[in-house]
Structure formats: structure tokens, C-alpha cells
Image: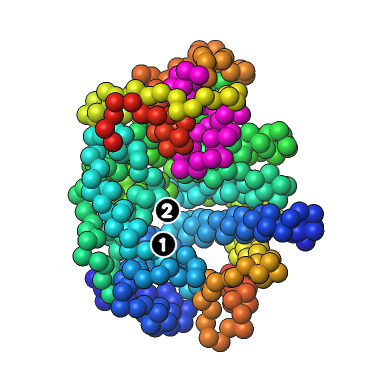
Amino acid sequence: MDTRTAIELICRKAGYDVWARLSASITGEEALVVSGSLFEGIGNVRSDLDFFVVSSSRPRDVPVRMTFAGKSWLDIEYVQAREVEDLTRKLATTDPKDIARVLQLSRPELDRYYRLAIGATVKGAYPPSVVFSLEAYRPVLRSWAILHAGAFSARATIALDSGDVTASTLYASYAAHLCTMGTLTDVGELYPSPKYTLEKAIRAFGSDSAEVSTIAALLHPSDDPVHYVRKAVEHIDTVLAECLSEMNADDLMTEAAAPIEHDRRLYVSTLMTRKAAHDVLPEDTAAIAALVPALGPPKAEDGQKAEDGQKQEPSAWQAEAHRLVLREALIDAGLLRQVNHAR
Amino acid sequence: MRGEIAKAMPMPVALRRSHDESSGRLEIMALMYDLDGALKAGQLGLARYTAGSLIDASVAVWLRERCTALPAFEHATARARVALSVLRAVNPDLASRVSALYCAALPLDVDAVTSHCQAVLDLVGDLTGHGSDGLASAVRAWAESARATRDLCERLGVPVGDFYWAPPDAETWHSDVLKHAAMEASS
């Protein structure tokens, strides 16, 4: 979308002359960028319009402003230019085959990078050091999404084994969204929000295509939830196996950074409180115990087995992705130390 | 309820709780916009995903208003899973209703998705106190919670920023938001 169209879009959405007010508030050291799902071409009449004010000067009094506009609203987010420089540098130096580096990126970081990268700069300019590359971003998003899909797929399997069908369905559906987000990068769909997964597939393949039917069935249960979970994890396992076979996953050496005195459940709760950047959940306890010997061997979970009585174990690929994601969470939280791994 | 909390606990704790409640109400409002837009545009994938997010956000608000705050998570599904475990302990009947919606068969069919979304909106109305007045109530609820948080900030001497740009002819930001809520209610 060109700048003129962007401004026209702003004018149509705003309930009063927000554009004049916003434009007047921008100083010479700032860039005004407009972005969001409408720019992506996938939004609707209720989608908000996202503005970013990228500033080299001091932070504003609030990080975000908003105002209603017609049937939706405008978001104005203030971002420091230094943060954007750090983010672009981080992404540019991330090898998509280096698992440890890929997992250092969070979903909000990938989301912000993409929104800024596709946005139109309607006033001012970025510092010259800020360079976005969707070519570099695409394989990183692919690896990141499929690895996390593997972790959630393993959680789905473990939850199913303990008889918690609801948790298992939640995990499997989310894992399917992440996995599809990763594979859709192959056809140029790079928007990193799981909520638009099916709409991206429709855009890529057409609403009546076989691909869309398959993806739609993968994303949500359409029959028995247990059957759905099994089909979803089977699919994700195949995609994950191919992805991991291309990545550097040789070095899993870790050691505990400090004695851990809590029992396992308290430990997991403590970690959730300390570190929000990764999601450490009840289904992760066995993998954590395997990574941190001080915790001892995993105990059998209480609860019923899956309906047919078969014990469901994560596949080798799921278990590996699960451990990789958790390992990074524990390292980030300072509870695990990496050994013999150049970061 | 907010007044009672403020009297019963240290002010900074009450401020944190009030801020979290306001954030939760904002999240629900944003999701209500997403769901409405998705259904109107025939974006069934967005509608299916957003319906699940609305359940999760509403359960989180319900628990928070009963003094059970959940940790922040990078992945929303993680919060949904933890929240459901807590809900099972607090209110098993409600947890069963939530579970049934999470596990509901949801084929890619306009009627099926619309019907599911209506069931979700009924649940959200019960959990949040919005009733059947959906989006307009969500806007009003966010406006009231945001105003309560700002009032608390002023009592504590915490600076409050100009977070909402109201049109020049609006009396206050709050009245402008309520005007939009009224427009939604009448549309």
C-alpha cells in the first residue's frame, strides 16, 4: 500500500481529524508508521488500525494511545528507535537453523518486527541503521512456529495420556495453528498471528481448495476430540521431523545453575511467576525433570488414561522440540546453565 | 467490589488489581470487536479462533474478580489451560460448561460456527456480567474499569497519561467512549 492510500485509509477510519493531531505530534526525530491487519489485506470492518511512533527522543508519557474511529479504533504505540534497532539486529543475526538462537525470539518480537516491516512510513524516517528484511524473517518465523508447535503437540499428547481431554484439545488446536503458520511461510504468508491462520490459507490456496479443507480440519475438532488430537499430533510430528532434521540440535548439554529445593509443582509455579516469556505448564514437569537432574525422576501423574486405555507417549520429534523449548525457558529464568554451546 | 478491595488491601496492591482488571476488560472488548468483524465478514477461521480466546479471557476476568490472578503467558493457550485447572477447583459446573465449549465439534460451516459463537457469547455474558448486550456492554465495562483505575492513580498521586484522544467536542474521554458504546447498542 502506498503512502497516499494509507493516509486516505486513516481519514476514512477516524471519527475526527486524528490524522492532523497525530501528524502534528510527530517531531523531527520520529517516524510515523501505519500498519496492522488492514495493511496486510486480511482485516475487516472491525479491525483496528495500528500506528507506531518510532522515536529517537525521550519516551512519551504513555506507551500506547487509542481513540475510537467509526466501527473500530486506532492504536498508537510509542516505540524507542533503539529497541527497533536491537530487534532488527537480533533477527538479522538469527540463523534459522540454529535452534538456540531461534528460540531466543518471542512471539511479541516476531509480531512487532513484521508489523513494522510491512508498515508504511507516512511521516519522518527510521534511523539509517534500521533495515527490515522479510527474506530473513520468513525462515526464522518458520522454524520458530514449527518448534513451538512441536512443544504444544507434546503437551497435547501428555495431557491426553493423563485423561485431560480439554487441555489436550486446547494444546492440539494451538499447535496446529502454529504448525500451519510455519508451513504457510512456504507460500509467502508471513503474518505471525495464529488467529488469521485459516484466512491466510484461503488467500494462498482459495476457499474451495483441498488444502483449505485439510487445514480447517486440522485447526479445530470437527468430531471426537480424542481422535482429533491424535490426527493433529500425527500431522505436526511429520512437519516437525522434517524441520528438525534441517536444524542444529546436537548440543543439548545443560547443568543446573543452582540447587532447586522446591518440589516439582511448586517449582513450576515459581517459574511461571518469575518468567513470563515462556510458558511452563503442568505437562512440562517430566521434561523439566529430565533436563534438571536435581528434580529427580518424573512421577506418574494421577488421573485417568485416555478412553481406549492406550498410553500416549510423545514421539521422539515432539519430545525433542518440547525439551528444546523448555530448555531455553529454564536458561532464560536462570535455573539452567548451557554447557559447551557458543551463543 | 472495587471499593471494597481498595478498603481491604494496601493501595498499591489495589492499584495493581484494578489495572489488571481494566486490562482484562480491554482484552475482552478487543476480542468482541474481532468476533463481530469476523462473523460479518464471513471470516470463519478468525471467528473460530476468537471464540476460544473470548472464553479464555472471560474465565480470566471471572477468576480475577474473585481474587485469583493468573500469571502472564506468552501463549494464550497456556493461560487457558491453567485457568481451567483453577476453575475446576473453584466451580466445577462452570468448568464443565467451559470445557464443553473448548472441545465442541466445530466444522468449517457458517451455521455451525455462528451457533458456536452465540453459545460462547452467552457464556461470556454470564462470566463478565455483560448479559446479552455483547459489544456495547464490553465497551462500557472497559470504560468503567479504566476510569476506576485512573481514579485510584489520582488518589495515590500516580501520574496518569493522556491515553485516549477524544474529539475536541467531547466532554471527557469517558463520555466519548460511552458515546461509542451507545452507538454500538443502537446499531
Q: Position of residue A273 (x, y in %)?
A: 57, 40
Residue type for callout 2: Gln
Which numbered tag is attached to residue B125? Answer: none
Left or right of A267? Residue A200 is left
Q: Is residue A105 above or below residue A148?
A: below
The residue where tag 2 is placed is: B43
Q: Position of residue B120 (x, y in %)?
A: 60, 47
Q: Residues within 10 Å of mark 2 (few under 14, many from 20)?
A: many
Residue type for callout 1: Asn
Corner quadrant of residue A167 = top right
Q: Is residue A300 above or below residue B165?
A: above
Residue range (magenta): A266-294
Q: Position of residue B181 (x, y in %)?
A: 61, 70
Q: Residue at x 29, y 26 (%)?
A: A340
The kind of secondary structure element at disc 1 is loop
Corner quadrant of residue A300 = top right
The residue where tag 1 is placed is: A44
Left or right of A46? Residue A40 is left
Residue A282 in magenta?
A: yes
Residue A272 visible to the viewer: yes
Give the spatial CA distance, label 2 vs label 1.
9 Å
Mark 2, chain letter? B
The kind of secondary structure element at disc 2 is loop
